[in-house]
Each structure stands twice: as structure tokens, then as C-alpha cells.
Amino acid sequence: MAAIHRLERTQLIPISLEKAWDFFSRPHNLEQITPAYMRFHITSPPVAHMYAGEVITYVIHPLLGIPLRWMTEITHVQEGRYFVDEQKKGPYALWHHQHHFEQVPGGVKMTDIVHYQLPLGLLGTLAEKLFVARQLEDIFAFRRKAITQLFGSLQE
């Protein structure tokens, strides 16, 4: 059985909790904070408010321009505090992504916690070591820069 990996990133953003929640709880805003080479495109219609049970479909091109269809479900929502998306169909054997928001002096502390597991046993383990872990690091590094460009940064 392939290992379950954990990625955690925290960012301090000089905006209100309400503004942070409004931006990050709208899946269509993901396109702004995802690297262009991924050609990330949400195919499901936008909804007014995120809710548990919401299904989001999209297409990404993570490797060699090959399109992958991905479906996630918002499984937990506590308005203004956190939400969780879980892959239902896509490239991972397991994808569980927690998004946490906490009001701090001068802004918001945003924490992403991702647990993921690749399919294909030994081949998946090799892929994780060769490129998946690095690609996820790059995506979250890009996301950090994009969020800083959009909203600014607090000293961490």
C-alpha cells in the first residue's frame, strides 16, 4: 500500500476574515491562483454560497499537457472557519484538502493541509518521488505568490 503524504502551508494575509472567506470559498477563484501551465478550468457552474455536498468538476493539464478530469466534493463547511474538499474522481487514490481561516492581528492566517496518496503501488511511489511532490510544492509556492500579489502579506 502506498504511503499517505501530508503537505501543510500557512500564509498570513492582511485582509478581513470575511474577505478571505468570500474569495477562497468560491471555487472559480482557484483559476487566479493556479499556475498557467496547469490550464486549470472549472467546468461546473458557479454557486452563490459554498455548501457541504457541493460537487466541483474541472480539467487540469498537470503533465505533458495531457488533460485530466477531476471531481471534488466539498464535504465539510464551517462558515468563515474552514472547508474540506475531497477528490471523488481524479488522479489520486486519496485527496483530502482542508482550508482553515483564523482571524489574527492585522489580517487572516490561512492554513492548507493536504493528505494525498497516489494509485499504482510502487509506480505511484516512484511518481511521487520523481515529480508529484515537487509539482505540489511548486503549485503551493505559486499560490503563495499569487495571493501576496492579490492581497499583500503580513510578516510571518
Image (tube, rainbow, N blue to C red):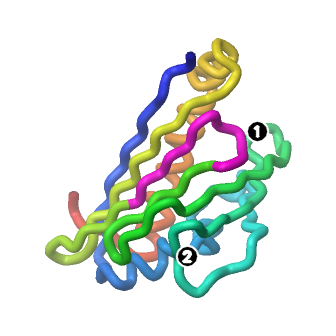
Say which residue label 2 marks. 26
Which one is in front, 107 or 74? 74
| Looking at the image, residue 154 lies above or below residue 11 | below
Pointer 1: residues within 10 angstroms few (<14), some, or many (20+)? few
- Determine the CA span between mark 2 and mark 1: 26 Å
Q: What SS does tag 2 mark?
A: loop
Looking at the rendering, in which quadrant would you find the C terminus? bottom left
| Looking at the image, residue 66 lies above or below residue 156 | above
Checking the image for residue 72, the label placed there is: none
Where residue 77 sits: x, y (%)?
Answer: 43, 68
Left or right relative to 39: residue 49:
left
| Looking at the image, residue 118 lies above or below residue 138 | above
Kind of residue indicated by mark 2: Arg
Which segment did they paint magenta? Answer: 88-99
Where residue 70 sits: x, y (%)?
Answer: 73, 52
Kind of residue indicated by mark 1: Leu
Q: Residue furthest top?
A: 122
Which one is in front, 138 or 79? 79
- Name the magenta segment's main secondary structure: strand
- Is residue 100 one of those drawn in magenta? no
Which one is in front, 8 or 13? 8
- Is residue 90 one of those drawn in magenta? yes
Nearer-N-terminus badge (2/1): 2
Q: What SS does tag 1 mark?
A: strand
